[in-house]
Image (spheres, coloured by chain):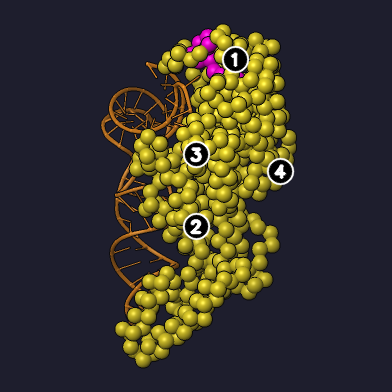
Chain colours: A yellow, B orange
Amino acid sequence: MRLFDTKRQSLQEFQPLHPGHASIYVCGPTVQSAPHIGHLRSALIYDLLRRWMTYRGLEVTLVRNVTDIEDRILSNAEAAGVPWWALAYRVEREFNRAYDALGILPPTYEPRATGTIERIQMLIELLLERGHAYRAEDESGDVYFDTSSWPDYGELTHQRPSEMAPGDTADRGKRTPADFALWKGHKPDEPDSASWPSPWGRGRPGWHIECSAMSTLYLGSRFDIHGGGLDLRFPHHENELAQTRAAGYDGPQLWMHNGLVSVSGQKMSKSLGNSVFASELLGRADAPTLRYFLGSAQYRSTLEYSPELLGEAEAAVGRIRNFLVRAEAALAPEAAAVAEEQVPEEFAAAMDDDLGVPQALAVLHEHVRRGNGQLGAPSELAETYRSVRAMLAVLGLDLAASGQGAPDRARTALDSLVPVLLQQRQQAREAHDFARADGLRALLVQAGLEIEDTPQGAKWRL
RNA sequence: GGUGGAGUGGCCGAGUGGCUAGGCAGCGGCCUGCAAAGCCGUAGACACGGGUUCGAAUCCCGUCUCCACCUCCA
């Protein structure tokens, strides 16, 4: 399969470092505030990558970190009047609930920055020894990465420090504005619990270093892929790469960056107040619809969010779901059983081409349409049905047609009441009392049911 | 100022030299008592100006516009 590499700015044939295995590190959230649609999209993209690689026979090790100590966590916690660790943990749990609700598979491991302090300190020590870091000249206890000591600085985003817009020079103890903190000395107004002893005094890790520490600790000096949001390219990933390599590690062989989500053509931001949070999104649509919607743009493109677009995704998913219901009704159970799940070649080609999910969805729809035309031809239908199921499985679209699981009491009540109404409607139709028949149908539709007349009589579903 | 990405029909979104993706919305037909669902058919586009070519959404040159990043960000 081919993937677009940010560093080389081109599609690269993916060659795992270890045949049959793929190692992926994805920048997870800084658990400072509630997850929004952008976080979900990002996580879903790497979930799809992982599922696809698994389908292709690779054993995938996916590490997605949690950055649970950082400036914004401290300031948000202080503003909320809660301990920073309580805020971080609450938000972390909120992220995981949202991931679960979307059917995003748990990563192989999910390390926390606070659990990696030893490794972080070891890296900083290495950087100091090798002359790529320095202790701040003031009494702050900070340690900075010395960008001027690393000739390749800027290699990821193809920038030269001299041509960048000048940064904040007022920062304490830095030699040049481009230098960034590896270790931040403890400040008297910060909680003691947010600091750890170190050779440079009590303090906490800077932002960036935790990813260098966690990726190389769990995946080794060299690993296959590093992923994250487009907005992390600089400074986060640029700095991370510089640190990792300057400390003597190789880092990832390929960098992936996913596009952002816009709302009304504007980037989501706190200052604009247009963020779409996971909690409200999960209340607006079911998991398959959200997965479909979030996959409707190629992962490197900006995805525009609006309720209308979400509605379109819902219609598309409904179409697929309708097909499954019909096909399962038309097929013998053993024909519908999916033994070997094999996706169509065009689907595979789309996924292999830099994770072309929109094209893959097109292939899916083509099969659904074909299948709808085969409802009278079971042998052909069975094959199409199995293809569709295979594609849905790879995409993580869990459209279990007939309501699995134990029926709840409301459902039991509907199961006994709806057929009575449908029977009354049928009697009215036979008596040509269409006003009454349509009235009964309108009642059911208003209650949220779908009524479908078929040669075998009326069928209903929620 | 620097770095990167992108402009395709009413909307979203594929397509990288010839063979009109797909979805939603629209229109016509089939089916239906009427609908819904489904199927079939159909219209509509390549930011602009040049150039290369038998042929350009696709390649080249120029112009315009938009987006992201340049030390808070998925």
Read off the residue under disc 4: A59
Q: Amino acid at mark 4?
A: Glu
Read off the residue under disc 1: A141
Left or right of residue A358, residue B55 in this image: left
Task: Report how far apart the C-alphas of labels 2 and 3 lie in the structure.
Answer: 23 Å
Instruction: Compare marks 3 and 4 and give the one earlier in the sequence.
Output: 3
Q: Chain of mark 1?
A: A
Which circle, 2 or 4, is nearer the viewer? Answer: 2
Q: Chain of mark 3?
A: A
Tell me which residue sits at (59%, 18%) in the image: A185
- Where does the magenta region start and end? A173-183
- Observer able to see residue A308: yes
Read off the residue under disc 3: A33
Q: Amino acid at mark 2?
A: Asp
Residue A97: give x, y in percent of width and height.
57, 49
Q: Are callouts 3 and 4 both on one chain?
A: yes
Q: Secondary structure at mark 1?
A: loop
Which circle, 4 or 1, is nearer the viewer? Answer: 1
Q: Amino acid at mark 1?
A: Gly
Instruction: Compare marks 2 and 3 and give the one earlier in the sequence.
Output: 3
Q: Secondary structure at mark 2?
A: loop
Task: Report how far apart the C-alphas of labels 1 and 3 lie in the structure.
Answer: 28 Å
Q: Amino acid at mark 3?
A: Ser
Q: Chain of mark 2?
A: A
Residue A359: give x, y in percent of width and height.
50, 48
Residue A180 magenta: yes
Task: Report how far apart the C-alphas of labels 4 and 1 lie in the structure.
Answer: 43 Å
Residue A340: image quadrant is: bottom right
- Near mark 4 (Cα within 10 A), the count class, few <14, some 14-19 or many ≥20, is some
Instruction: Compare marks 1 and 2 and give the one earlier in the sequence.
Output: 1
- Near mark 2 (Cα within 10 A), the count class, few <14, some 14-19 or many ≥20, is few
Q: Secondary structure at mark 4?
A: strand
